[in-house]
Image: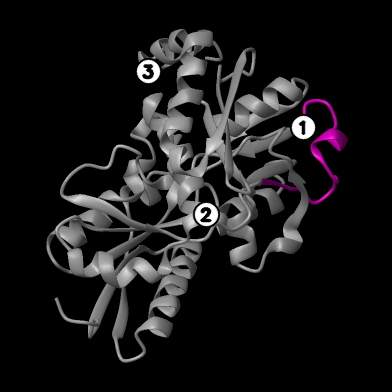
């Protein structure tokens, strides 16, 4: 293995947000390896093309990574950049998650032209979201609102709001901030109201597991604090069979040397939400996530998961 890379190709989705993320990784790498030639390979994934159905009905978030993984396999790219929440938690050989970078704001954001918060929306107002996780938590707190599916890239979703198709939409705060659209955020949803998805706000870099050279070259980009939190969150999702068919959330935060994990599993209609938490040393991050998942399973999540994964849904 040579000391530094001379040329690298980054696979990325073609959306504006995905390109921002890939360019961010490129710039970080360029600062570490100024002599390296770094280029982007842009691709449109199946998840980007299927916009008329929810992710839970067409195969889940893994649809956003398959084409990028093919580019890694055939040698067209050396690394792929993903929003970590889109990376399946059961990544298998020959792929590996090389580094997890510093997390941006993990919260969900309330985006609306005419109202300042979910509390201010009138009865029956239509709220758009692509996430069963967000939908269940909003339905629990605001049963008077109507939740409707919202697909497409960030600009497409904002356009639907601006055309009046929705009274408000819920988006990840990190994506809006990365594109300089923080002025569109009317309110941030506290994690107590909308517990984030595992890995939300963080970037993950994927490589072939055989590429020890890439693992070493990418190491300077890793953020230890975010990595510990994300490992705990992804352990929750993995233990619960993480799937877009299930309203599932996990969020970890550091307090000194202690790590606290919060997790939930819900009915899609918000009629029942199970919550659990665990805390302990950072070194036990994955075990803490697994503990929170076990508590959820013991508290009734097993029945919810079994029914939803079998295709049943009380909200349908």
Q: Which residue is mark 3?
A: 309
- Callout 2: 10 Å neighbours few (<14), some, many (20+)? some
Rendered image quadrant of residue 216: bottom left
* Residue where numbered disc 1 is placed: 125
Q: Which residue is mark 2?
A: 225
Q: Quadrant of residue 231?
A: top left
Q: Secondary structure at mark 3?
A: helix
- Horizontal side of residue 111 vs 209, given as left or right: right
Q: How many marks?
A: 3
Mark 1 Cα-neighbour bin, 10 Å: few <14, some 14–19, many ≥20: some
Mark 1 lies on a secondary structure that is loop
Task: Give the number of the mark in front: 1 or 2.
Answer: 2
Q: Nearer the viewer, residue 130 or 33?
A: 33
Task: Tell whether label 3 touches label 2 (CB within 8 Å).
Answer: no
- Nearer to us: label 1 or label 3: 3
Percent from the top left, x then y, of residue 107? 65, 46
Q: For residue 117: magenta?
A: yes
The residue depicted at 84 percent of the width and 48 percent of the height is 114
User: Range of the magenta residues?
Assistant: 108-124
| Residue 244 is at least partly visible in this image | no
């Amino acid at each position: 293995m040579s000391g530094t890379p001379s040329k690298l190709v980054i696979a990325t989705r073609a959306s504006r947000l995905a390109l921002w993320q890939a360019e961010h990784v490129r710039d970080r790498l360029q600062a570490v390896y100024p002599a390296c030639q770094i280029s982007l390979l842009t691709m449109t994934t199946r998840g980007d093309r299927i916009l008329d159905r929810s992710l839970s009905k067409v195969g889940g978030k893994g649809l956003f990574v398959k084409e990028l993984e093919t580019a890694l396999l055939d040698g067209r790219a050396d690394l792929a950049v993903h929003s970590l929440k889109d990376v399946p938690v059961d990544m298998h050989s020959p792929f590996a998650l090389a580094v997890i970078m510093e997390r941006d704001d993990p919260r969900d954001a309330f985006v609306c032209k005419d109202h300042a918060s979910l509390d201010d929306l009138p009865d029956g107002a239509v709220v758009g979201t692509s996430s069963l996780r967000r939908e269940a938590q909003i339905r629990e707190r605001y049963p008077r609102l109507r939740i409707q599916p919202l697909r497409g890239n960030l600009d497409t979703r904002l356009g639907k709001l601006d055309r009046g198709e929705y009274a408000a939409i819920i988006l990840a705060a990190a994506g809006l901030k990365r594109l300089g659209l923080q002025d569109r955020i009317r309110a941030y949803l506290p994690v107590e109201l909308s517990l984030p998805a595992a890995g939300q706000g963080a970037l993950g870099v994927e490589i072939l597991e055989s590429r020890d050279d890439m693992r070493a070259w990418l190491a300077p980009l890793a953020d230890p604090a975010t990595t510990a939190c994300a490992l705990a969150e992804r352990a929750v999702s993995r233990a619960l069979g993480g799937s877009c068919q299930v309203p599932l959330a996990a969020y970890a935060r550091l307090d000194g040397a202690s790590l606290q994990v919060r997790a939930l599993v819900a009915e899609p209609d918000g009629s029942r939400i199970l919550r659990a938490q665990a805390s302990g040393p950072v070194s036990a991050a994955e075990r803490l996530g697994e503990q929170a998942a076990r508590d959820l399973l013991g508290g009734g999540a097993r029945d919810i998961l079994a029914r939803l994964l079998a295709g049943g849904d009380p909200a349908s």
